[in-house]
Amino acid sequence: MTTAQSLAAVAPAEANVARRADHPFRLRTMVVVGVRMMFHDRLKLAGTLFGVIFAVVLTNQQLGVFLGLLDKNSMFIDHAGADIWIAPPATKTLQAGKPVPMAALYEARTTPGVAWAEPLIFSGATVSLPGGGSEPVTLVGTKSPAWRGGPWNLVAGSVDALRRPDTMIFEDSQRDILGGLNVGSVREVSRRRIVVGGFTWGLLPFGPSYAFADYDLARELTGTPVDETSFVLVGVSPGADRDVVAHALQARVGDNQVFTAAEFRSRVLTYILANTGIGVTTGTSTAFGLIVGLVIVGLAMFSAVVDNIREFGTLKALGCRNRDLAVLLLTQSAVYALLGSTIGLGMISFVADRVRSPNFALVLPWQAYAATPVVMATLCGLASLLALVRVRNVEPAMVFR
Amino acid sequence: MIDTENGSRVVDVRGLTKVYGSGALAFEALKDVDFHADRGEFVMLSGPSGSGKTTLLSILGCVLSPTDGHVVLFGRDVSNATEDVLPALRLDLIGFVFQGFNLIASLTVRDNVAFVLQLRGWQPRAARTEADKLLADVGIGDKGDALPRDLSGGQRQRVAIARAIAGNPPLLLADEPTANLDGHTGLQVTELLKNLARAHGSTVIVVTHDNRIFHVADRIVHIEDGRVSA
């Protein structure tokens, strides 16, 4: 095929300005050139990627710690298995406060749409240590046979151990702190002799670890009167609307508060965010990570343009428009974002897996994995603006100098 | 529309003036220059350094705007054309050969040539096939996969020529194409440029002060102190 025939076959035959539409090959060409330019200068590629990875790792690490802390504060609500909670008046967090009268439990059990209702003891207790001294635990008392409210995540023993007299289940990670506990060990809890019946794993809230007991044992250990309880857990019948049921319950339980599980979780977390420095601290660190990443990527991309300014001038002289060069730079931003996100998320996932323990966990939900490339693409796009301005000002006549 | 098929006058410049800077620092690089080139002509612009020949070439290449005067390419006055249309004009009408080759370092030799064709609307595969053919035409058909850094100066300039003639632009502009080459290679490259341009029916304007290649030209235009003197 001659050149003329090739032209006739694949390109408009006439050379004129009007036919210069935005054909797809033009876009593809700029994308390919942008990627090739990126990978040609490996050092600059590494430097720019470092910026993106730094931002990805720092922001996700901060986010993971933040969510891990929130998770510690909401894990009980998430695992209790209740659709609705009846809590004492003015409840802001999951802590023992003014008791709920047992009348609320009976009201709940007779409310339409309620499948079940169980009392829950949730209170502080102390474990005396063999060598003297004591350690606090958060004592949770639940009712057999359903054991609504736990325990869960058992690594030794079984829930049914709680049926045995004076038996409790403790947190595995606290065994040493509680004086070298094993199944069958005996400890004094709130001045009563208790046998260790099993261990949970990871049930370590922001405060003292959870320790589980049968409801009646827990009531006796905490001195809770028979006509009172800490919370009432409610399950909604299949097909019933939990908001409607919650509304009906609220009308029956007087000053006590009724929350759906989601509302209670939100209330607890909102209180923590508003009354502790967690939100501000992690938010500042996250913003810091994004800003540093933005600066590194911005400067690296600008520097890449300056280093290759003659090539950009040549591209303009050969017929590239500013928008073609914008496509080139935005392609580079997108690739930096994608590569940096992939590597950064891989690193943070690896670290999260290695550091996970009952005391500390980086919680990274799928939304973080999905949002990171989008956030980084936005960040890199912003970072490329400086380079875009520089490219826009490149005079094609420079190629003759 | 620019008619590149009819009429023998490809470039027609009248009263061209270019002033750099302003006020007391103003420098008049071109002074009331008249110039023309006809279809298929091989014209050399010669003159000492700073005479204004590269400025004239830049204006003809639509990469620099004139201060005054008229530049008509293929019957269209482009003197006041804006950046909205200039890139398309350059892409459609003009092939460039630069003194420093100006190849894209990250692209292979083949892709340096195919790139321009793809900008012009060629499918990537057809563009690469055509690029291979053009590289064979300039005598480096076996270098398609090489990067520019792996080539000698003469080979790079051959790639630049292949890129310039890719897509058959009707006007080729070359700025000191032999400046970085030895005498023998410089002459070879110039003759190659002329032969290929003739085969493609392109008009060529070469800026040079290399008197070893003057005999290749159909016509030599001398510029001195911003004026055409002969």
Image (spheres, coloured by chain):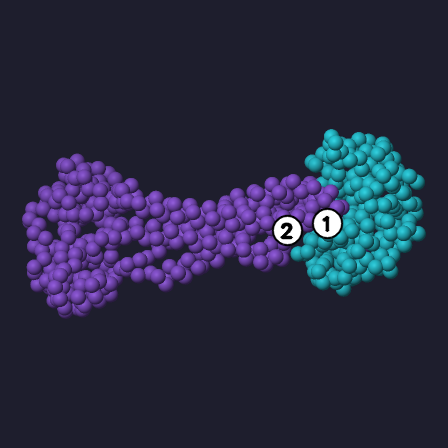
Most foreground residue, B44 or A226: B44
Instruction: Please tell me whether mark 1 or mark 2 is closer to you in this view.
Output: 2
Marked residue chain, label 1: B
Residue that appears at 69% across and 36% down: B84
Most foreground residue, A199 or A143: A199
Crowd class of label 1 (few under 14; some 14 to 19; many from 20; radius 10 Å) = many
Q: Which chain is purple?
A: A
Picture coordinates of residue A290, whole percent (x, y)? 45, 47
* Residue at mark 1: B116
**Which color is chain B depicted in?**
cyan
Residue that appears at 67% across and 44% down: A23
Q: Secondary structure at mark 1?
A: helix
Asked if residue A112 lies left or right of residue A49, the reply is: left
Most foreground residue, B32 or A227: B32
Crowd class of label 2 (few under 14; some 14 to 19; many from 20; radius 10 Å) = few
Quarter-of-image position of residue A277: top left
Tag shown at residue A307: 2
Quarter-of-image position of residue B40: top right
Quarter-of-image position of residue B126: bottom right
Picture coordinates of residue B226, whole percent (x, y)? 84, 38
Which three-letter amino acid code belongs to the residue tagged 2? Asp
Q: Is residue A18 visible?
A: no
